[in-house]
Image (cartoon, rainbow, N blue to C red):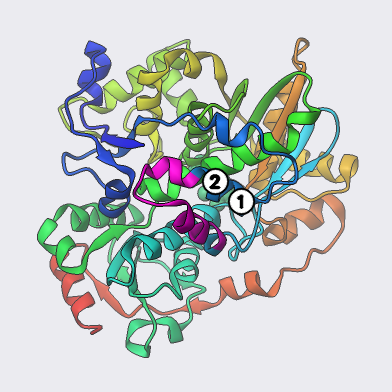
Amino acid sequence: MYFRSTVNLSADLQTGLAGDSGAVSFKEAVLRCLPKEGGLYVPDSVPDLRPFFLHMGEETAYPELAAAVTPLLFEGDLNPLSASRVAENAFTFEPELVQLDETFSLLNLYNGPTGVFKDFGISFLAALLEELLQGETAMVIAAARGNTGVAIARAFEHREGIITTLLYPDEPIYGLESSSYVPQGGNVIPIRVKGTLDDCQKLVREVIQDRSFAERYRITGANAINPGRLLPQSFYFLYSFIKLKKHLTGELVFSIPSGNFGNLIAGLYAWKFGMPVNGYIAAMNANNYISNIKERYNYNSLGEVIKNGILADFKGGTFAHGFAGSKPAVSTIAPALDVGHPSNYERLASFYKSAPAVMQNMVFPEGIDDAGALKAMETAWKRYGIHLDPHGAVAFAAAENAAAYKDFNGHIVVLATGHPAKYADLAFKVSGKRLSLPEQLASLDRRAEPIAEIAPDLEGLESAIAGCF
Ligand SMILES: *Cc1c(COP(=O)(O)O)cnc(C)c1O
């Protein structure tokens, strides 16, 4: 498949014509991470994967599915043998689909090394880069906060020749082992940037766009701006379909706890690949970007919100990231959804442009407050004897609302994106049970120190990196 930049999106949306930015291969998009024109990479042409997954049975293992579809996405840049190696290498953990009853299933995505779904995309990207680079040295760079940094460090730990530079905002750092740092013979360079997460993200973009810098170290990005991390997230939607298709009688809907909209976009890509599906619930908490736009501009339909939201963002020629619906994020019990400026909004708008009817009729935004999420945790425990983390609970609450519509006749797959034991206090509150944290997750909370502290600029970054070798 091929990718193009979202940079002409504003003009494209106004004229309805395709922009003229050049398309690049998947391999090039992964190795560059960001288009040179600016914006983000989005699929330009998409393969029909139906012949490859429609006949797959329930017994298909996750790495098998990933290995079968990956070569099609790379069209010649990755042969079936290499794709199998990437899949086997990346997925030493698997998603787990649990059918709860007629109406609901859970897609548990927290079995990876750091207990969140992000392990799936990161692990695939790490294995993919190792395969594409064939032993050549390279560097990945990422803005990191909370457990994102450890997730990236763990995934790249043993990858030959790949240095991992992590840019942290001015906050405590957790979970890294100093034995994995470059000066100690490892491959990780954690740097504290005197600034916010936004400053770190800006610096990542600058580094990638500064071609002399980027080429010197052969740098690409490991945040979700890299399509090599986002696209493989579509695999678990296909996987759910394979597991369920024999049992489905009505509609198939996914309920997705949404912060930066990465999982929602990945689900929509699965539809583009040919997966039969009827809808996606974008389950948000109090930080409901879509209803913010709706209120501010008085739009009624989702299509209007997405389209005009992005046009408003583009006012003045540059993309004011998520300006249209942005409000300062408020803290909730599901912190990964506390996003003021969703980083994949451009991709959502670009998807709207290519398939407006899908966005109008298949994406249902839903807002759930803390009380609603807690109640859903309690319902899950009382009705099914299972624990949900607060992010999964937001999605479950939204799914319950959808299932309560009188003409609803279908099955809803709820994405459980985080490990419930990470929120043991909430689990105790709703069930009276103490969950114990698996050791690999407990180690994520240990304090760690950066190698260097820099001002948010390229010079500081360059000297910090150079100082490690
Ligand atoms: C990151 C995260 C989310 C939000 O996912 P997006 O793809 O950014 O919408 C949801 N749940 C958990 C546990 C997360 O870590």
| Lateral position of residue 358 relative to residue 245, left or right | left
Work out which quarter of the rendered image holds the C terminus and state it.
bottom left
Q: Which residue is mark 1?
A: 64
Work out which quarter of the rendered image holds the N terminus and state it.
top left
Q: In terms of image quadrants, where is residue 427?
A: bottom right
x, y percentage for residue 253?
66, 26
What residue is shown at x 34% (from left), y 83% (from top)? 182
Labelled pair 2, 1 in contact (Cβ < 8 Å): yes
Look at the picture and state if 451 lies above or below 20: below
Q: In terms of image quadrants, where is residue 135?
A: bottom left
x, y percentage for residue 315?
20, 25
Numbered disc 1: secondary structure:
helix
Numbered disc 2: secondary structure:
helix
Alpha carbon of mark 2 to alpha carbon of mark 1: how far?
6 Å
Q: Residues within 10 Å of mark 1 (few under 14, many from 20)?
A: some
Q: 464 or 431, which is in the foreground?
A: 464
**Which residues are the magenta region?**
70-88
Q: Is mark 1 within 8 Å of ligand 1?
A: no
Q: Which residue is mark 2?
A: 68
| Lateral position of residue 233 relative to residue 414, left or right | left
Q: Which mark is residue 205?
A: none
x, y percentage for residue 183?
32, 87
| Lateral position of residue 317 relative to residue 375, left or right | left
x, y percentage for residue 328?
41, 40
Q: Is mark 2 within 8 Å of ligand 1?
A: no
Tell me the amino acid under the disc marked 1.
Answer: Glu
